[in-house]
């Protein structure tokens, strides 16, 4: 009898102890990752929840100890039958006193998890789309037509006569472009009533702009890219060079098959760009493409050393990232893709080098219009600084937020880290799930600009555009044009 009762009591004591230990480990890990300042702020937000957990644990342990003592005293002073009756009574009496506290622990724990990981209640439209995507996954996996969601087949009348050009990069990322085309994209498009499809394979890594520039856009209604960021950017470059009027606004969709898929994550509203793309995300984007959901996307243009302007999407990187890209390209023959790139970034971070540029930018809230060509004289509306910088780049889009918040109104971000005391400060900053989180750190800042001129003050003349290495520069000029707006479908 004693052994059974003590086992029950130990089990009931162990649960709140394990919960408290797990909470302590989670708080410690978050503190180390967020850094000293961010960790203190974060702990301050969850302190009330932690106090509730401690109070619940104390109350639960007190009730269990009191019940155990009562059980022992009554059993020692009475007969075996009375002891058995008392045991049953005490066991029942534990339920209304102990289990409510356990539920309190669980409720507080769920509240804490939601506050940390940002779980929000989904709308009815989101729930409906999630269910539709789940059916599509089941259909493509089992090949049974009974699982085809009616939301997809209902689009056949709307898509009748719709002409789509599919630009597929067979070597992008893990070389799965053709597999995705035949096993995922084609079945979905045909069930949605899109049957007038032309497939074009890229000829090489840099052939996409030329192929798009030579395409007769009048024969198609949309272009669907199957590849990574480089494929999408190549299409944008090709449209920028196309002789057709307003070709840059031709509708474009994207099925991600690249190494990073940064643009897809931004346009899909991922809560962090460090998250992996899954099949459900691809199908959700395809479903939006079949519905014809379009989003206007302002496209900035960049010119280096007064050369012809070129559009770009993902961003520009200088200094640390440009050096890391050069190091990574030396190891391209290994085929490791992400591994070699991240290893190169870490190598450059721990070198902890300072980079100096003369930066002049026109703030986004300025009433002055951005000049079409690099200015030779700068008015007082332009802000000038000379660094040094530990991290410097330009992003036309935000990330880690819903699509509506990620797209800016003809301005972009200068991403600057200039006050990090150690390499770990840089790492903590770039691992932030949202770009806007940079503003909460003393070591980093974001400047909203609608035009920027960059000149190297030392030998750091390397730079990348949309992840591709460019020739060394003496001056780079970036601006937004109100007439340059792309159309994203999906």
Image (cartoon, rainbow, N blue to C red):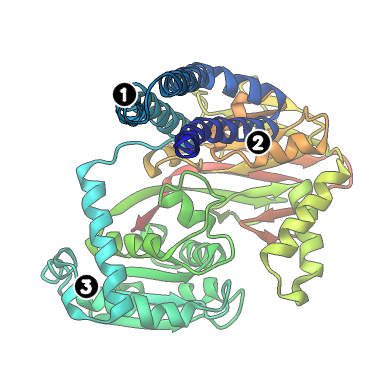
Give the x, y percent position of residue 223.
Answer: 37, 69
Give the x, y percent position of residue 142.
Answer: 29, 79
* Helix, strand or loop under label 3: loop
* Helix, strand or loop under label 1: helix
- Give the class, few, some or many, for how many residues have Cα within 10 Å of label 2's Cα (few <14, many ≥20): few
Tell me the residue that label 1 is attached to.
93
Q: Is residue 276 above or below residue 38?
A: below
* Helix, strand or loop under label 2: helix
- Give the class, few, some or many, for how many residues have Cα within 10 Å of label 1's Cα (few <14, many ≥20): few
Q: Residue 322 vs residue 141: left or right?
A: right
Residues at marks 2 and 1, CA–CA distance in whole angstroms: 39 Å
- Which residue: 51% across, 34% down? 10
Q: Residue 156 vs residue 302: left or right?
A: left
Q: Nearer the viewer, residue 465 or 155?
A: 155
Residues at marks 1 and 3, CA–CA distance in whole angstroms: 70 Å
Q: Which mark is residue 360?
A: none
Tell me the residue that label 2 is attached to.
29
Residues at marks 3 and 2, CA–CA distance in whole angstroms: 52 Å
Tell me the residue that label 3 is attached to.
162
């Amino acid at each position: 009898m004693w052994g059974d009762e003590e086992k029950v009591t130990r089990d009931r004591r162990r649960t709140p102890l394990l919960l408290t230990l797990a909470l302590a480990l989670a708080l410690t890990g978050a503190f180390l990752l967020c850094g000293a300042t961010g960790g203190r702020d974060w702990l301050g937000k969850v302190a009330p929840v932690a106090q509730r957990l401690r109070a619940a644990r104390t109350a639960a342990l007190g009730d269990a100890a009191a019940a155990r003592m009562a059980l022992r005293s009554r059993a020692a002073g009475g007969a075996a039958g009375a002891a058995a009756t008392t045991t049953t009574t005490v066991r029942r009496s534990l339920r209304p006193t102990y289990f409510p506290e356990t539920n309190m622990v669980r409720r507080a724990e769920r509240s804490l998890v939601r506050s940390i990981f940002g779980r929000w209640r989904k709308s009815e439209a989101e729930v409906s789309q999630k269910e539709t995507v789940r059916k599509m996954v089941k259909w493509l996996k089992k090949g049974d037509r009974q699982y085809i969601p009616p939301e997809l087949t209902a689009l056949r009348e709307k898509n009748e006569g719709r002409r789509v050009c599919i630009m597929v990069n067979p070597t992008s990322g893990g070389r799965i472009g053709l597999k995705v085309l035949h096993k995922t994209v084609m079945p979905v498009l045909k069930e949605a009533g899109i049957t007038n499809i032309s497939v074009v394979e890229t000829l090489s890594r840099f052939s996409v702009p030329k192929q798009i520039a030579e395409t007769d856009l009048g024969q198609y209604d949309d272009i669907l890219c199957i590849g990574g960021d480089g494929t999408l950017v190549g299409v944008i470059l090709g449209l920028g060079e196309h002789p057709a009027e307003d070709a840059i606004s031709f509708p474009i969709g994207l099925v991600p098959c690249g190494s990073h898929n940064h643009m897809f994550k931004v346009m899909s509203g991922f809560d962090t760009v460090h998250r992996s793309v899954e099949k459900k995300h691809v199908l959700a984007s395809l479903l939006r493409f079949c519905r014809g959901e379009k989003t206007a996307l302002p496209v900035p243009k960049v010119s280096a050393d007064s050369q012809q302007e070129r559009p770009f999407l993902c961003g520009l990187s200088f200094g640390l990232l440009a050096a890391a890209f050069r190091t990574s390209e030396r190891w391209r023959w290994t085929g490791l893709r992400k591994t070699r790139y991240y290893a190169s970034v870490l190598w450059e971070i721990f070198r902890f080098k300072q980079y100096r540029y003369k930066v002049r930018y026109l703030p986004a809230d300025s009433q002055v219009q951005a000049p079409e060509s690099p200015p030779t004289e700068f008015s007082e509306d332009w802000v000038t600084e000379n660094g040094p910088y530990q991290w410097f780049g330009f992003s036309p889009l935000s990330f880690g937020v819903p699509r509506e918040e990620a797209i800016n109104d003809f301005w972009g971000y200068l991403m600057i880290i200039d006050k990090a005391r150690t390499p770990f400060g840089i790492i903590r900053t770039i691992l932030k799930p949202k770009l806007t989180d940079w503003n909460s750190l003393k070591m980093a800042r974001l400047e909203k600009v609608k035009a920027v001129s960059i000149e190297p003050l030392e030998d750091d003349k390397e730079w990348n555009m949309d992840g591709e290495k460019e020739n060394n520069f003496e001056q780079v000029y970036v601006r937004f044009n109100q007439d340059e707006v792309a159309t994203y479908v999906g």
